[in-house]
Image: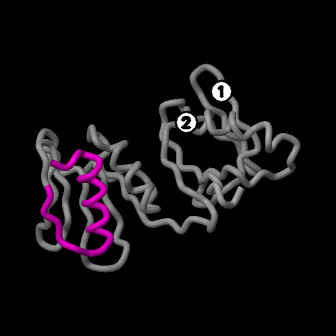
Amino acid sequence: MLSDIDLIRDFVKLSIQKKEVLLSNSTLQGETVYKINQLTAKKEGVIVTTKLESTLNPFLVKYKSNYWQLITQVLAEYNFILIGDIDNRGFYQYEYCQIPEGYQMHCEKAANLWRTWWKYRQRIQGKVIQLELLIRIRNTWYPIRSLSVSDGLTYIETLGSEIAVSLEDLVIWLSKTKENK
């Protein structure tokens, strides 16, 4: 029997390949209905949809789903990231995003970015512009200049601005792959 993460990975992979799906385990079911692949959670209803019409169609993911973080993680593995605001049905749109060569995308809690930053900070200290870690802000990848935590918030400073996010918020960031360090 497929685990939830494996079923979600298979659903995303087949959907990207524009193939119809028929998958299930005890909690999730993936199927094709009228040229739309949809993933349904037994206790929540439809939680992900994507059309099978053209290349790299967006995925729509239900925000209030218990599987939202897991789905976001899997979509990030295939370079799909959250774009725009929530729609009137409670779904976020995820679109394909070209990742710069030599980088790996992460879509994780800000606390994980902080841990990674802590490991890198000695190596990048003193550099004017470090390219080890990048964060996506306003549809552009920016190098992270500094990162600090205070009162449950993570403050991320880039060349252009500073943003504050909760340690529990998901952030999209890139790290150099091991062979490019």
Residue 148 versus residue 124: which sits nearer the camera? 124
- The answer to whether residue 146 is seen in the rendering is yes
Label 2: state its secondary structure. Answer: helix
Q: Position of residue 111 (x, y in %)?
A: 55, 32
Please tell me whether residue 11 belongs to the stretch shown in magenta: yes
Kindly identify which numbered label has been placed on residue 61: none
Query: Quarter of the image containing the C terminus?
Result: bottom right
Identify the residue at horizontal 19%, vertical 60% (top origin): 38
Q: Is residue 51 above or below residue 135?
A: below
Identify the residue at horizontal 17%, vertical 66% (top origin): 21
Q: Is residue 91 left or right of residue 157?
A: left
Q: Is residue 33 left or right of residue 66?
A: left
Residue 28 versus residue 170: which sits nearer the camera? 28
Give the residues in magenta.
1-23
Q: Residues within 10 Å of mark 1 (few under 14, many from 20)?
A: some
Identify the residue at horizontal 12%, vertical 72% (top origin): 34
Residue 59 location, quadrant:
bottom left
Residue type, mark 1 in image: Val
- The answer to whether residue 83 is seen in the rendering is no
Q: Which residue is mark 1?
A: 149
Kindly identify which numbered label has been placed on residue 112: 2
Q: Position of residue 90 (x, y in %)?
A: 29, 47
Residue 156 location, quadrant:
top right
Residue 68 location, quadrant:
top left
